[in-house]
Amino acid sequence: MALVLNEEQVMLKESAAGFLAEKATVAQLRALRDSGGEQGFASEVWAEMAGMGWAGIAIPEEFGGLGYGYTGLGLVLEQVGRNLSASPLESTVLVAATLVAQLGSTEQKQRLLPAIAAGELLASLALQEGGHHAPLQVEASAKRDGDSYVINGSKRLVLDAGAAQVFVVIARTGGNAGDEHGLSALLVDAGTAGLSVERRSMVDSRAMGAIVLDNVRVPAANLLGAEGGAWEGLSRTLDIANIGLAAELLGLSVEAFERTVAYLKERKQFGVAIGSFQGLQHRAAELFAELELARSIVLQSLQAIDAGEQDLSLVASAAKAKLCEVAQRASNEAIQMHGGIGMTDEYEIGFFIKRARVAQHTFGDYNYHLDRFALLSGF
Amino acid sequence: MSDLEQFRQETRAWLEQNCPASMRTPAKGFDDLYNGGRNPEIDHPDQKIWCDRMAARGWTVPHWPREYGGGGLDKEEVKILRQEMARIDARSPLDSFGISMLGPALLHFGSEAQKLDHLPKIARGEIRWCQGYSEPNAGSDLASLATKAEDKGDHYLINGQKIWTSYADKADWIFCLVRTDNSGSKHEGISFVLFDMASPGVTTRPIRLISGSSPFCETFFDNVKAYKTNLIGEEGKGWAIAKYLLTHEREMISSFGAAPGKSVGQMAVEAMGADATGRLANGVLRQAIAQYQLDTLVFGATMARVGDEAKAGQGLGAASSIFKYYGTELNKRRNELNLAALGEPALGWDGDEYCGGVVSRDWLRSKGNSIEGGTSEVQLNIIAKRVLGLPDA
């Protein structure tokens, strides 16, 4: 497939850029942070996004979505990264809907996906337990008891935990931590007895949370896919999620870079624009080269999802590792090249480095994905 | 059957019949490629046979027009020819600066008479060309070149010195930047002329490199005659041609970044072993190799993307400015990793046990990639100023 956007995709990208630059900007993120609200995003903005079809952008038409595919979602996420727009687009659309589509029965998909596509249902994956992404190191348990499962365990880094109406909890019905077999995915409604949701305050001011499951009982019909057989669908979902996060990191990095280059042209020291100094020019030029490379792998990996490639793991880890590296460099250089003003809360550039590190960490950082890339490459 | 499918079948059949068996093996490095010329260096008689057969069809330069010795093929046909050649591992029949550098410039800037005079000889591999650009005091600052061309009516009299002239000692003709006027800015008054290296007054002296080979020369001109019929474009306007041609040179050099064959990671596992999880035993080296392989993959995707965008008429070509810089830096990294992964065998300089020192010599030669054709630092200056619009100091 040619590595270019088609006309429909170019239009989508432009309309997303226009909408987010007006309705979901860094200034809005700052206001959300300072208001200290529980939800972490603006309901009216999310309703408008859903109205434009974004909540169902990658959901097939038969389940009420637009069927634009993940390349379309990725283009929106790139613009989300540019504006640091807070919304359940990642928790619900990129991750949870993908997992339901991967593992769910037709009946489950018919019940959940159209509701997600309409923007009426918010869902979130509850996977991570320790300080690092380690998707096989799951200790939370689900025990079959008659027509129900009883779930115990605790999860963290649950995106939009406070707003989610349903969680997809990954728990063990068999095997031990580290095993691929024995992992199961279970739907747990937010109000279920024994489930407690705690808002966590993270550096990027997004609505993350932790949940504790204390003898939570759900009907056996809430199992997604086969008992103990969630790994394959979960693994593919994580690959797709990481490609989506790479798209967000691309937008974030490009925006931080463009703001920095503009500042280099404007800020004067020693009587000249600091952008005339070769010490800064070469660093900016190197970063430009890295950003061009980053753009290519993001597009290639998004297209790989839509082409239905059987194994996404190598390209997904390549995309996430590269974008983690580039986002770290772009956000660090943004602070350094802005100098003192880059250290102030009043200036917006600090929001970019904060979101960058959380997005980098989510579902595996540079170290995790470069290691995985090397293993998959045979060393 | 579509026309293209028929073209593929005919091409396949012709190649099967005409490509000698010995030309269906990869060339053993640069020295094993066929460069043509009046006195060609022939390691194997099949090289010339293969070149002549391909040239007879115009397929040494399949995309050039037929009247200039090309094959007159369109892009799709050229692609099919390349695929069919790759299918039988056929070597490129002719590699020359005439094809990769001068040809495109002549097609763009040359007069009809000049094209008819020079292009067919390039296509047939009859004349080997070298490039007279750098001078001892005009390297990165190429436009300050001083080789003087004095107007003598129907010809110029050339005096001066060039350096880093690739294969000047083996070339038949030179395309050369000379100064025809000193009065304006340094970019004005440069002219682009062609002349015969067998002319009286031309001397070349090969420069031995740290890699032990001597691909470059010092070239001296002492009252050398260059006829005005071989002035390309207008007198004093040669800088535009020089820049156009440099982009072709840079494309050629940046393609070194695409590493063929076994991956460094696999090579390192064979040389050093892996642990029980399949990870290369040395974690520090493993990370460097993984980062290199990641960047190589992503660089390849970028070359593809820029090509696809150009075909689709999208993009401003800004990304192509990174190719020379990134490709050559990648190639240097690859060569450093070869040394680290292989250890002692990579440090051999000569002898069969070290395959003639091919690894260490390639490593040393790669250092020049980020110097020749515009240093990495010059490339970064170009990106900073032309792409990012950062101000001059």
Image (spheres, helix red, strand yellow):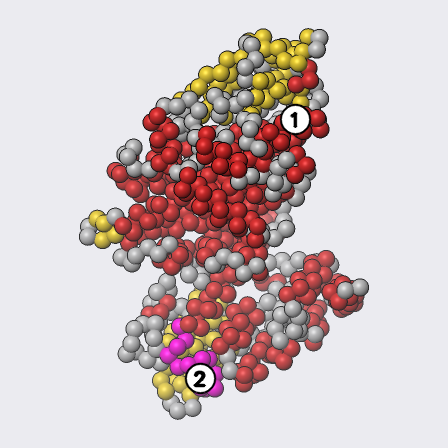
Q: Dot 2, crowdedness within 10 Å: few (<14), some or many (≥20)? A: many
Quadrant in which the C terminus of chain A appears: top right
Above or below for A64 versus A278: above
The three-letter code of the residue at mark 2 reads: Ala
Q: Mark 1 lies on which chain?
A: A
Q: Position of residue B357 (x, y in %)?
A: 56, 52
Residue at image coords 43%, 68%:
B243
Q: Residue A72 shows which numbered tag? A: none
Above or below for B175 versus A331: below
User: Magenta stretch?
Assistant: B227-239
Above or below for B116 versus A1: below
Q: Residue furthest left?
A: A271
- Pick the residue in front: B307 or B247: B307
Q: Is residue B233 magenta?
A: yes
Q: Dot 1, crowdedness within 10 Å: few (<14), some or many (≥20)? A: few
Q: Residue B226 shows which numbered tag? A: 2
